[in-house]
Image: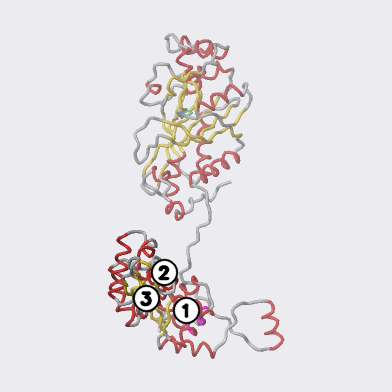
Amino acid sequence: MSDTARTPLHPIEKKVLSSLSGRRTLDFDSLVASAGLVPDQVRRSISWLSSKGLVDVQEASTFVLIASDVPPPELLLVSKLEESRGSLPMAEMKAHFKSNQEFSAALGRASSAGWISIVPQQSGPVITLKDPEGAKKLRGVLSKLAGGLNESEAGPEFRDLSADLLKRGLLTRRVSRITTMTITQQGLDALASAETESYAEKLTPELLASVRSSGVAVKLRPIDVRAPAASFFPGRRHPVKEFINEVREVYLSMGFVEIAGDSVQSSLWNFDALFTPQDHPARELQDTFYIKGGRDQGLQRTDVVARVASAHENGWETGSKGWRYSWDIEEARRLVLRTHTTALTVRATMDSADKETRVFTIGRVYRNENLDYKHLAELTQMEGIVIGEGLNLRHLMGLLTRFYGKLGMSRVKLWPSYFPYTEPAMQVMIYYEKVGRWIEMGGSGIFRPEVTRPLGVRKPVLAWGLGLERLLMLRLGIQDIRELYNSDVEWLRRRREIASSPDIL
Ligand code: PHE
């Protein structure tokens, strides 16, 4: 006997076994009825009992005969005769039938069975009832078949008639599967011993009190804690959303304030204010999604815009020579799906009015990328800036290291890099132990004076923009970034928790 077989029976199992012990074999519905349980309880305990060898389950299929609700025409004919005291002129009878064909079929069958006779009269032939016994028998059979009858239980009188009725489509034959349960000898033994032993089902204060006052020990029914239980999937957030919340907490814990902005931006904020020349390859259609025909007509040559234009053309008062071309406000008006959240932080740089500032934003950006295991066309950036007197690259490096540390990534490497809007610039790399490789996470740097001065800011601005999905991929241990957005319900339900870092907050 296995371990489970020795576990005392659950009260539901006991009920099922004792229902089976009388007749030994029952079909599912009768078992439900006689055990006084709900079908689900019976189904579950049957699967338990059968795995313990206490019950045998047999599946069988039988045929069920079901009569159609339209009666055969010959019976209609007999009924009409009965209603008119046994006889009716042929012409009148005919009026009760839908078609000539149906009428002659009824007439043919009823007369060859000897139920009626046709008597010629002066006014025309008259149908009279002769021996309706056969008709009554047929009627009886059909009414029994109306609700369906198991073929194996059908007597000889059914068998004689059914072949003909089946052929005429007045009867159908359907397969029906039935499950029957039989208690085994082991089951009978288990039930017998279960009846001699008694267990308490629940540990309650009353039980404790009664044991205490009576001094009689009570056995609690042991519970098999390794027994498989139904899976339970409570609602949970999408992993990306969950991770966004975690990153938000990290930024907030570092004293940052969140900002948000539109997905559609003018090129001014996505590119020009960031000192990205108007012929820069990143601005081309194959990298950027433009809104067809979209122009920010509200964009006028304000002071800020004029200074941005000068910065591009000749460097304005920044000491730079600028890009040395003629800046076009029409190009700056073109609307784009933001290609980075720097479009928001550069605006926040202007809004700071040169005061000490720490802001962050987490948002979608859009790029005309070829999709592969590490590239999405829509991705989330977690971006921030810090504005403050005397800030330098060391502060930026410390800040990024601390940020990733809080997200559970202890090895951060910063490589020299290039962006039109930062000097110096650094690429942010994270070491991923599992694959033993450094993985690129995003860019960072100090905004150039060509960016900050036209916006009225003189203090250094530390800036960075980092990919969220890349990092989440590492945290979830998935190989392909696209898996995050497949919306595979099975994966969403069963995915493991995002491995949380010990030093968060
Ligand atoms: N905007 C850059 C990107 O999308 C990241 C960046 C932000 C770089 C700020 C430097 C400063 O990759």
Residue closest to the far right: 213
Residue type highlighted by circle 1: Leu
The reply to whether discs 3 and 2 touch (Cβ–Cβ < 8 Å) is: no
Element type where label 1 sits in the image: helix
The residue under the point 52% across, 31% down is 394
Ligand 1 near label 1 (Cβ, under 8 Å)?
no
Of residues 363 and 18, the one drawn nearer to the viewer in this rendering? 18
Residue 15 painted magenta = yes
Name which of mark 2 and mark 1 comes first in the sequence. Answer: 1
Residue 8 % position (x, y): 50, 82
Quadrant for the N terminus in the image: bottom left
Amino acid type, mark 2 = Lys
The label on residue 80 is 2
Question: Which amino acid, mark 3?
Answer: Leu
What is the image's colouring? secondary structure
Give the crowd class for mark 3: few <14, some 14-19, many >=20 residues within 10 Å. Answer: many
Q: Disc 3 designates what residue?
A: 129
Query: Where is mark 1, residue-wise?
Result: 31
Question: Could you tell me which residue is drawn at 43 percent across and 47 percent down?
Answer: 487
Q: Nearer the viewer, residue 479 or 452?
A: 479
Mark 2 neighbour density, 10 Å: few (under 14) some (14–19) many (20 or more)? some
Q: Which residues are magenta?
A: 12-17
